[in-house]
Image: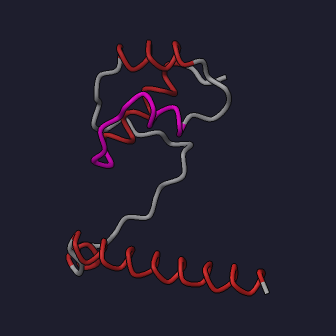
Amino acid sequence: MTSINDIHQIANKLKNEGKQPTTALVKSRVTGNVPLPTIIQAMKSWQHEPDNIATNAPVAEKQTVEEASTGSDSDILSQILNRLTAIEDRISRMEAQLKK
C-alpha cells in the first residue's frame, strides 16, 4: 500500500516536472489501490520540496530545448487535427467496406 510519503514524492515529482499536482493527477500515478481520502489527506499536508523527487518512479523523457522550440501549440494542434481527420476517414472507409 502506498504511504503518505509516497504520495508526497509523487506530488513533488509532478511539481518538479512543471505540473500542478492535483488529487486526480496524483491518483493516476499512484500504484495500487489507495483510498481517495488518503490521497486527499496527503495532498493537504504536502509542501513542495524541490529536491525531493521519487527515486523509484521511471523518469520521463525530457524534450530538448530545440525540440520544444520547433513547434508552437497551434502547430501541434494542427498536426493532431490532421491525424484525427485521417483516422476518421479510415474508419469511414472500413465501415463502408463492412456494409458491403
Placement of the C terminus among the 4 image quadrants = bottom right
Residue for point 28% across, 29% down? 48
Query: Foreground residue, 85 or 96?
Result: 96
Total marks shown come to 0
> Relative to 27, does residue 47 appear above or below in the rendering?
above
Relative placement, left or right, of 69 versus 16 is left
Residue range (magenta): 16-29
Query: Foreground residue, 79 or 4?
Result: 79
Residue for point 44% across, 12% down? 41
Residue for point 60% across, 18% down? 35
Residue 82 position in % (x across, y down): 39, 81
Residue 59 position in % (x across, y down): 48, 55
Residue for point 50% across, 42% down? 55
> Relative to 45, does residue 33 appear above or below in the rendering?
below
State how the image is colored.
Answer: secondary structure
> Relative to 42, does residue 96 appear above or below in the rendering?
below
Placement of the N terminus among the 4 image quadrants = top right
Query: Foreground residue, 77 or 5?
Result: 77
Relative placement, left or right, of 13 versus 49 is right
Residue 34 position in % (x across, y down): 61, 22
Query: Foreground residue, 56 or 47?
Result: 47
The image quadrant of residue 85 is bottom left
The image quadrant of residue 3 is top right
Q: Is residue 27 magenta?
A: yes
Residue furthest front as drawn: 100
Q: Is residue 18 magenta?
A: yes
> Relative to 44, does residue 89 appear above or below in the rendering?
below
